[in-house]
Image: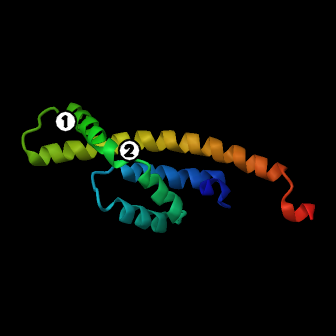
Amino acid sequence: MALLHLDDPPWRVALALALGVFISFTPFLGFQTLLALLAATVFRLNAAVVVTGTWLNLPWFMPFVYAGALKLGALLLPDLKDFGDWSIALLIGTTLLGLAAAVVTYVVAFGIMRRRWKRREQTPSKREAA
């Protein structure tokens, strides 16, 4: 897996992946890759990793994600009256679900990357062996 061979420290790779996952939960379908590239540039993270995180949320899961996000937003905003209110509910719900997914992604990715990083440091490189 190419992500596991990056020279960035584990926390930066995990952060880039988590940011991409957060972006994947936004209701801005069609612009998520552009948002990922912009965020990678602004935060000086590896763009390939941020985009990869964005693409982890597969399109056939999106109806379930948006339905759950809308329910969550509606719970937090009980007096929804018009389309604008429902849009805000969706935005709040996707933000909260995206944050939760990003935190889980960061913890898991950081653990994996840290183990790989330590193993790589303990193993002599091919250049040193020659």
Instruction: Give the image quarter of residue 77.
Output: top left
Q: Is residue 96 left or right of residue 70?
A: right
Q: Earlier in the sequence, mark 2 or mark 1?
A: 1
Q: How many marks?
A: 2
Residue 48 image label: none
Query: Disc 2 vs disc 1: Cβ atoms closer than 8 Å?
Result: no
Foreground mark, 2 or 1, reads 2
Task: Name the foreground residue: 51 vs 8.
Answer: 51
The secondary structure type at the circle numbered 2 is: helix
User: In the rendered image, which residue does mark 1 sit on?
Assistant: 77
Q: Secondary structure at mark 1?
A: loop
Question: Relative to the observer, which residue lies in front, 103 or 52?
Answer: 52
Residue 24 image position (x, y, % from top left): 38, 51
Percent x, y for residue 63?
A: 26, 42
Q: Is residue 30 above or below residue 60?
A: below
Residue drawn at 72 percent across, 50 percent down: 117
Question: Considering only vertical position in the picture, is 36 above or below 1?
Answer: below
Q: Dividing the picture into quarters, in which one does residue 38 lie?
A: bottom left
Amino acid at the residue labelled 1 = Leu
Using a 10 Å C-alpha cutoff, classify the residue at mark 1 as few (fewer than 14 neighbours), some (14 to 19) or many (20 or more). some
Density class for disc 2 (Cα within 10 Å; few <14, some 14-19, many ≥20) is: many
Q: Residue at x 42, y 61 (%)?
A: 36
Seen as rendered, the residue at the extreme left is 81
Q: Quadrant of the C terminus?
A: bottom right
How far across and how far down the image is residue 113, in percent?
A: 65, 47
Please state if 92 lies on the left or on the right of 99 as rendered: left
The one of 36 and 74 positioned closer to us in this rendering:
36
The amino acid type, in three-letter code, at marker 2 is Gly
Residue that badge 2 annotates = 98
Residue appearing at x 60%, y 55% in the figure: 3
